[in-house]
Amino acid sequence: MFFLCAPDDPRLDTVWEKCDELRLPINLHIADHPSCWQPLGPHQERTPDFQTFNLYGKDVPSYEELLSTRDRMLAKHPKTLFIACHLSNQRNDLSTLAAVLERYPNLCLDISARDYELGRQPRSALKFLARFSDRIFFGTDMGREKKVYLGWWRLLETADEYIPGRIWWRYCGLDLPPDLLEKLYRINARRLLNWRR
């Protein structure tokens, strides 16, 4: 039997509490790009490549409802470390996401599969990544082919402009400083995931 269980569901409370006790971070995928709740068409920025993710007209919680469940979960379990993948699917509005991070110090992020959002707003992205440099780390769910990592390298480590993106947008390189890159690639993952040598 399948049932919808939101992350703030009381039935999960003991799971989140046990994860805190064991110092196990929880990686969650919450929501998706807000355009998924809009009709497909020529003005929908994720058409046609992402049409399989479209939720318009479907019996699912709204984008705002899903983010609210995240916030209630974070407030209810302030000692439990949560890692929201894909920049918590709020990378389209980094100022609002920054306010969420300020409000909930138990929230961390990974940047997996959101290259196209970071590369389209390079100045804002650089400021955001620097401001929360201890709470964000690299991740990917786009495969392990060399071209995937070369794309990330060019985005994060160069100042190249008008880079052909993996979708149809053009990116600008973020040219991140070495100390920020080290946190993003290695230091934060080791600390947040409790890795030991």
Image (tube, rainbow, N blue to C red):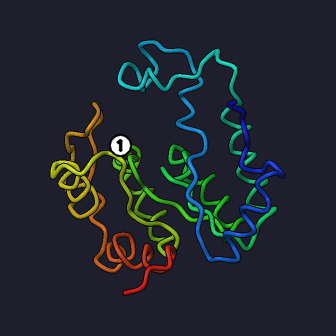
Which quarter of the rendering shows the C terminus?
A: bottom left
The residue that appears at 55% across and 58% down in the rendered structure is 27
Mark 1 belongs to which amino acid? Answer: Tyr
Q: Is residue 47 above or below residue 64?
A: above
Report the number of discs.
1
Secondary structure beneath disc 1?
Answer: helix
Of residue 107 and residue 120, the one placed in the foreground of this image is 107
Residue 153 in the image: state x and y as whole percent. Answer: 22, 59
Q: In the displayed structure, does residue 146 sit left or right of residue 103?
A: left
Q: Is residue 120 above or below residue 12?
A: above
The residue that appears at 64% across and 69% down in the rendered structure is 81
Q: Is residue 45 above or below residue 135?
A: above
Which quarter of the rendering shows the N terminus?
A: top right
Residue 122 in the image: state x and y as whole percent. Answer: 36, 54
User: Which quadrant of the structure image shows residue 42?
Assistant: top left
Residue marked by disc 1: 116
The residue that appears at 48% across and 50% down in the rendered structure is 86
| Extreme residue toward the bottom, this view | 197
Q: In the displayed structure, does residue 167 sit left or right of residue 164?
A: right
Residue 132 in the image: state x and y as whole percent. Answer: 52, 70
